[in-house]
Amino acid sequence: MRSRVRITRWHGDPCYAREDMTEVASVLYGREDIRHRVQELGRAITGDYEGREPVLISVLKGGTMFLADLFRQIGLPVAVEFMSISRYGDAPESLGRVRILMDLQADLANRDVVLVEDIVDTGLTLSYLLSNLRARGPASVEVCTLLDKSVRRIAPLDVRYVGFDCPDRFVVGYGLDYRDRYRNLADILAVDDMRAFEDDPDVLVPLLAT
Ligand code: IMP
Ligand code: MG
């Protein structure tokens, strides 16, 4: 049975709760905060790459919403490339090992590359990707991530552009998923009650397209 969701206000921010008043998730970064920050990042990239034509690389699938908004805020000619990868699971010995499922179409030799990510967590996936991309002879490689869970970092990384420094919470929306759903939430929500959420993964459905 699908529980109903009430939208309430809590400390000024919308808060989504079940009928039994258990708080399941709350807005961490609203759509307007995201829009402003993406605009600022676009301006920063525009300034830093003046006179050049960077290649923006997005890793499917989570980073694609961010890429779509970000690259319309960049006032330079840019190329867009996509890559698809799969992780080998969460076992310690396989951490950070990544298989490329779909590779780039462009040759990166002498290009200025900006890797656009939704979130950097441990950094293990990203550090593999960076060494893979650097081996292709680009002129430069920088990272632009919307969210940085910096407290969780295992692999030390230099992330040039960060949208928000994200607390150690599970987040969904604006490209970020829970089992492939909720990427299409317009806001980024932090899950406050992970158990309630796992018990009833449909709980946020009424918030889609709102
Ligand atoms: P890591 O930096 O190698 O640990 O992995 C980062 C990836 O983990 C991201 O690209 C996301 O797919 C996923 N991820 C990490 N934290 C979250 C979260 O809070 N919500 C949804 N996906 C997450
Ligand atoms: Mg990702």
Image (tube, rainbow, N blue to C red):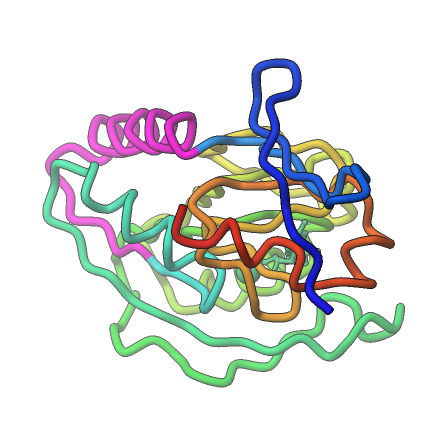
The number of numbered badges drawn on the structure is 0
Where is residue 205? Give x, y as percent: 56, 58
Quadrant of the rendering where the C terminus is positioned: top left
Mostly what secondary structure, the magenta segment? Answer: helix
Q: Which residue is found at the position 45% from the left and 65% from the top? A: 59
152 up-or-down from 163: above or below: below
In the image, farthest residue toward the top? 11
Q: Is residue 39 magenta?
A: yes
Taking the image in four quarters, ligand 1 sits in the one at bottom right
47 up-or-down from 85: above or below: above
Q: Is residue 122 magenta?
A: no
- Looking at this view, is 24 or 54 the one in front? 24
Q: What range of the chain is rendered magenta?
A: 31-56
- Looking at this view, is 140 or 191 the one in front? 191
Left or right: residue 182 compared with residue 199: left
Where is residue 48? Give x, y as percent: 26, 29
- Looking at this view, is 115 or 68 the one in front? 68
Q: Which residue is found at the position 15% from the left and 43% from the top? A: 52
Where is residue 12? Give x, y as percent: 57, 15
Q: Which residue is found at the position 47% from the left and 76% from the top? A: 84
- Quarter of the image for residue 73 reads top left
Where is residue 129? Give x, y as percent: 54, 64
- Quarter of the image for residue 90 reads bottom right
Q: Which residue is found at the position 27% from the left and 78% from the top? A: 105
Quadrant of the rendering where the N terminus is positioned: bottom right
Left or right: residue 171 compared with residue 187: right
